[in-house]
Image (spheres, rainbow, N blue to C red):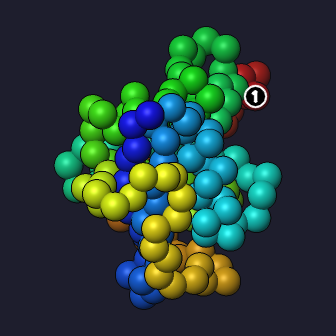
Amino acid sequence: MALFSLMVTLDDERNNVLRQLVVDGDQSLFDLHNLLVDYFDLSKGEMASFYHVEGEWETTEEIPMEVFDPKVESQTMFSINIEDVFSRENRLVYVYDFIALWTFFIERVKLAEDVSQPGLVASIGELPETPPAKTFMGNDFPSSEDFEDEDEDEDAW
């Protein structure tokens, strides 16, 4: 059983909220999702996704709970083990509740020699009552100019 030590930090510049945990590499990313819900005291039952990361925390490929488009071939949290991810890469982004957008940075850290069992190693700070506001820069949102004239393609809707 390979153990991985992970540092999980809330994306929030105003509050220092983090958890260090040790997880069994044989567990799935869905198991990690459930641990994060418990360790951060998030309300249960919301959708979430993990994201692969490049550069300065730029998200790339999504690892969803479920794939809703049958034309898209994608692995889910259930089909990927923690070891599959963290033996190849050091970081993931975790987004919980797609309305509130709780966002966490996950980094693999050096495993302490005296830790031999999975579990919570350290806990600093409490989640704020509301998720930190997200600021979108540039042209992240479409404008009315991005859409065709309604009269041209009225039957498409």
| Residue furthest out toward the bottom | 14
| Residue furthest out toward the left | 55
Residue visible at 34% across and 61% down? 114
- Please rate how many residues cluster around mark 1, counting C-alpha atoms within 10 Å: few if below 14, some from 14 to 19, many from 20: few
* Residue 144 position (above or below residue 19): above
Residue visible at 40% across and 44% down? 3
Residue 104 appears in the picture as rendered: no
Callout 1: SS: loop
* Residue 61 position (above or below residue 46): above
Location of residue 75 in the rendering, given as x and y in whole percent from the top left corner: 53, 22
Location of residue 136 in the rendering, given as x and y in whole percent from the top left corner: 42, 64
Residue visible at 49% across and 52% down? 117
Nearest to the observer: residue 107 or residue 46: 107
* Residue 86 position (above or below residue 78): below
From the image, tell me which residue sits under label 1: 157
Residue 55 appears in the picture as rendered: yes
Left or right of residue 124, residue 109 in this image: left
Quarter of the picture containing the C terminus is top right
User: Disc 1 residue type?
Assistant: Trp
Residue visible at 61% across and 54% down? 35
